[in-house]
Amino acid sequence: MQGRSRKLACSMLAGAFCVTSLAEGSAQSLSTYGTPGLVEMPTARVLKDGDLAFTASTFGPNYRYSATFQVLPRLYGTFRYSQIKNISTNAFLDGDTFDRSFDVHYQIWDETDLRPAFAVGLRDFLGTGILSSEYFVATKSFGSKLEVTGGLGWGRLAGRNSFSNPFSILSDRFDTRTRDANRGGQLETGNWFRGPTSVFAGVQWNVSDQMTLFAEYSPDEYTRESVNTGIDVSSPLNVGLEYRFNNGVHLKGFVVGGHEVGAQLSYVINPKKPSVPGGLEQAPRTIGARNRLAIAEWNNSAAGGGRDAVEAVLQRVLAEDGLELQGFTMSGNRATVRVENTRFDNEAQAAGRTARAMAVTLPPAIEEFTVVFLERGVPLNQIVTQRSDLEELQFDYDGAWRSLARARLEDGHDQGREGELADIYPVFDTSIGPYLATSFFDPNSPIRADFGVQLKMDYRPRPGLTFAGRFRYPLVGNIDKSFRVSDSVIEPVRSNAVRYAKESELEVNSLTAEYLFRPGKDLFGRVSAGYLEGMFGGVSTEVLWYPMDSRLALGAELNYVKQRDFDMLFGFQDYDVVTGHASAYYDLGNGFFGQLDVGRYLAGDYGATFSLDREFNNGFKVGGYFTLTDVSFDDFGEGSFDKGLRFEVPLSWLTGRPSRTKVQQTIKPITRDGGARLAVANRLHGVVRDYRGKELRDSWGRYLR
């Protein structure tokens, strides 16, 4: 087990150095808990707004892996996965404790010339409580070199030299802390800031801009660890030395309790700052003045060939920008193109590139451009612009936003198939490539993964109708090596995932027929049937109402599904269920997006899922969700209720080149059966949202790029 944890730490170290060019240095030091701090003690500091920090630390029997996100300028949250060797409350855990925990920290006020920064925090407030503590902390800098921190702590931060709780003057309920461990997932508010209290303190000395020394007084006696592992923390003094590289990597060595030597790696990125600011895409075409254009200048081949020749040239020019022309009409001084964006993750930029292609290709008499964006042949919107505006504003410093004021963003639901290219259907796409499937937080292995080959096949005989298959063959991996078995007291709709891994070889991951359509203005529809995901198949229907310029969208989904055989081929088990949700999606502003789903889940339980994401202008997203249903915390089991964190990183953020590919990962502390939802592909809101008015307007700054 120790070897596995060290391998994980080494992997994190290697991964950090592989991407060191992606981040700028962060001056804020992080503690072994992955939060702004000294060695182990917190400070009143916070990260830069939007910072995302990953930390791996080890000393004695302790291994901690943390992710901290600066949600708001004064608020950060932390998810942590910890291993404590030779301490277990369950024989199943092979002598070690594997623990998931969450922290939250709020800076009440920042430092001024006269007063220190002041903050309040909760450690392990939504975990098992093994690491739980609460604190108030103040931090003050003296010049550019010295920084002093002091605070009051409860829980684990109230070991050495503890004294009576100062809050006892309010109520004697603050005298007692009832317990410090549970099954996890419950807010033990009855323990917060209760029981004995201790003081903690520390100093840091900035030797240089990149090197810092730490010394702190820690009240944490590691009582449980000392008894079971022999860890020696007899001294309250912890010391450390940190070196910060300019690329976001921090390396720290430290000594805890006077005897236990440890090491720590941290890596800090800010999603606001992509690897290549501005991007590496090819510059857009320059639009010439029409009054100096001769037919030969806009295209010799089009001059003698009429509309068909113009269409061919336009199709070629659009294809050079990764835009697939599917329809084209010209009438009077107006032209309409129907395109599918296969390259740009910024739809406004795709619209601008399409308009430029029209301007350099179409006859000078064409003044009004209508661009209709399609998804699988279904219109999502239409953007109407004037050619003269492009000519006037293409080099204007504020040209993008001035062009937005003159453009019309419309729903486009009534766009038919007029002008559809003769050879556009049927469409058949196939690809073979690698896949990586991951499984996190198995108690006997923090990370499990399978690597293999995946065959993707899509056949589209007409707009909106797609027959799709995803077939996988695992080559190497260890997901099937887990010996976890479902102990669920409700229907095991997810907790038997290991059986699917063990009993399958060639996997029919999905095999579906899907139809996307537009029932009316601001309305979108989807019907999917077949093997919808790895564990369930059946029929899924959905409708979405999403006005063009609205922050709010409403949807409804209804599914009838059966559980698939464990071999993931073509059979079903006996269990079936009707499941579905009513959903509300709302843009909260300032980069925050909320979603509420209310309905019935796969195990037949009823409840609601609450989601919140912070979204950055470049497409990077960090968020989380939790689900509460009528399954009791006891029946749910470890974790008490379903919850998770999720990340979405556009490939363009990493490479600087336009791409619609996104790296998505959801991290769940534990996978159980309550609150489990069908994993059907192409839910409408995700398909539609980027092409609606609010999103287009927010991203219009790249229209002329």
Image (cartoon, rainbow, N blue to C red):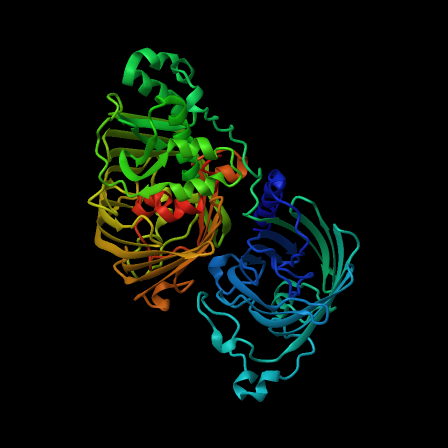
Residue at x-position 49% and y-position 44%: 618
What percent of the width, then of the height, locates residue 547? 29, 50
Residue 111 in the image: above or below residue 578: below
Residue sitting farthest toward the front: 291
What percent of the width, then of the height, locates residue 469? 29, 34
Q: Residue 683 vs residue 661: left or right?
A: left
Residue 260 in the image: above or below residue 308: below
Quarter-wise, where is residue 451 in the image? top left
Q: Residue 169 vs residue 526: left or right?
A: right
Label total for image = 0
What percent of the width, then of the height, locates residue 365? 33, 24
Does any portion of residue 369 appear in the rendered image?
A: yes
Residues 515 and 259: in front is 515
Q: Residue 218 vs residue 692: left or right?
A: right
What percent of the width, then of the height, locates residue 31? 65, 59
Residue at x-position 44% and y-position 44%: 699
Residue at x-position 55% and y-position 79%: 194
Residues 508 and 109: in front is 109
Residue 194 in the image: above or below residue 398: below
Residue 151 in the image: above or below residue 340: below
Does any portion of residue 434 appear in the rendered image?
A: no
Residues 411 and 384: in front is 384
Residues 141 and 211: in front is 141
Quarter-wise, where is residue 105 in the image? bottom right
Residue at x-position 67% and y-position 67%: 111
Quarter-wise, where is residue 508 in the image? top left
Q: Residue 230 vs residue 398: left or right?
A: right
